[in-house]
Image (cartoon, grey):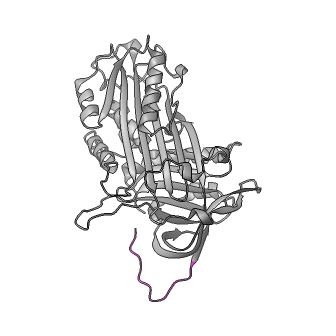
């Protein structure tokens, strides 16, 4: 399960978030988007110079400034829409709101428009802050098909604000092998504290999935449909969901501490039964501390005056720095497939071995806390990653699956 290094760094950032949440008293369900973090950090790097640029390049594991454009093209190619019927719907957008009196650098403007396909607006933060927050929230809601609302509040913008950088990501895919609603039924899910909750589990029998395992966990790879393709048309993307199930009911933290995505090998396997809980998760996080944990410090340093690639000059009393990075995510998993979205704002198969006999069937019953991710397998890009510790947490707000706005019936 090889990973692209420029995509992998943001998984490290989000893995830290998952670990810290598990260590806390709250132990909430989590969903994050490494891909969305990658996008905003790439835009920050375009406007960085000196040691600040070097620190950003090292974090995203890129060797030169020129490679930022290659990385942006990779992200753009990842979400190019397919014309195939039933193919996943994936959209990706960048936007910047810039204080109208800043002397924006011409190269920076051209790069973010032409390479990063970003929408840009010149605004008056000092006198139109409330309207700006409303505009940014509406942009995020529109770009995520209504799933992400109120990414910003009025207090996030003040007279000192000069830039807003935003990314929005939306994904909707249907399973290559769907579960049948008529056999969905309630089962016990074992919580980390030893108690149990009764939740709806999707049931599948005698299905073939890609499967991997280690001493500490099992992992199943469930592909999303690519669509009905003409044999002459090459499909260069394959989206999949991975569920990493610890061997022990309380083994999720140990899994996060020891997992190495590059060392997981998969074989096509026939399962006797596959039981996966239906779930819906919403999560909002602040990202400065997780990024600092990975060694990124200079963007948040008020004394570091190295964002001068964004503007032609910056006075000593007007040095640009990053005050806040917020991400808000949503995911819903049901019998038909998955719908997920993220918004980030700055105030990132092995061959099947031949078998001459039928191998024993494997059961995969995800009835205790697990980690999951949505990944594009050709590039190795991780769109979403999260942990499910209690599927009943958001149950009261779950819509029946027949009421979801599914594009494909």
Magenta-highlighted stretch: main secondary structure?
loop
Q: Position of residue 48 (x, y in %)?
A: 33, 30
> Relative to 239, is 286 on the left or the right?
right
Q: Which of 59 and 219 is in front in this view?
A: 219
Q: Does the magenta stretch include residue 356?
A: yes
Q: In this view, does 22 lie above or below 152?
A: below
Residue sitting at the far bottom: 356
Residue ID at (46%, 16%): 129
Residue ID at (29%, 36%): 117
Q: In this picture, which residue range is highlighted in magenta?
A: 348-361
Residue sitting at the far right: 195
Residue 396 visible to an observer of this rendering:
yes
Residue ID at (48%, 89%): 357
Q: Position of residue 3 (x, y in %)?
A: 40, 57
Residue 47 visible to an observer of this rendering:
no
Report the quarter where the N terminus lies: bottom left
């Amino acid at each position: 399960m090889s990973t692209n290094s420029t995509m992998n760094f943001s998984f490290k950032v989000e893995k830290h978030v998952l670990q810290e949440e598990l260590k806390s008293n709250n132990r909430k369900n989590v969903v994050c988007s490494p891909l969305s973090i990658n996008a905003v950090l790439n835009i920050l790097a375009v406007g960085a110079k000196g040691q600040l640029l070097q620190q950003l390049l090292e974090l995203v594991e890129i060797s030169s400034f020129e490679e930022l454009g290659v990385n942006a093209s990779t992200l753009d190619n990842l979400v190019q829409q397919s014309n195939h019927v039933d193919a996943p719907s994936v959209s990706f957008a960048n936007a910047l709101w810039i204080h109208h009196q800043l002397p924006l650098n011409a190269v920076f403007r051209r790069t973010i428009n032409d390479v990063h396909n970003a929408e840009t607006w010149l605004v008056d933060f000092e006198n139109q802050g409330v309207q700006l927050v409303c505009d940014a929230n509406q942009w995020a809601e529109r770009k995520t098909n209504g799933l992400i609302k109120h990414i910003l509040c009025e207090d996030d913008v003040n007279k000192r604000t000069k830039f807003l950088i935003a990314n929005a990501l939306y994904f909707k895919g249907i399973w290559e092998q769907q579960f049948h609603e008529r056999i969905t039924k309630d089962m016990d899910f074992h919580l980390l504290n030893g108690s149990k909750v009764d939740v709806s589990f999707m049931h599948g029998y005698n299905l073939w999935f890609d499967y991997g395992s280690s001493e500490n966990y099992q992992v199943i790879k469930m592909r999303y449909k690519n669509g009905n393709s003409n044999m002459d048309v090459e499909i260069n993307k394959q989206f999949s969901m991975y569920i990493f199930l610890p061997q022990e009911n309380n083994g999720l933290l140990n899994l996060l501490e020891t997992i190495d995505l590059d060392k997981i090998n998969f074989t096509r396997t026939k399962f006797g039964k596959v039981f996966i809980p239906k779930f819906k998760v919403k999560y909002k996080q602040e990202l400065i501390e997780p990024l600092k944990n990975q060694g990124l410090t200079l963007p948040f340093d008020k004394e570091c005056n190295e964002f001068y690639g964004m503007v032609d000059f910056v006075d000593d009393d007007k040095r640009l720095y990053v005050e806040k990075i917020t991400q808000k995510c949503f995911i819903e998993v049901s019998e038909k497939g998955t719908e997920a979205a993220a918004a980030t704002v700055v105030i990132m198969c092995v061959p099947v071995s031949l078998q001459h006999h039928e191998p024993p069937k494997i059961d995969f019953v995800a009835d205790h806390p697990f980690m999951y991710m949505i990944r594009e397998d050709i590039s190795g890009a991780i769109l979403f990653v999260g942990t499910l510790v209690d599927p009943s947490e958001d149950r009261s707000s779950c819509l029946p699956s027949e009421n979801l706005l599914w594009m494909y019936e």
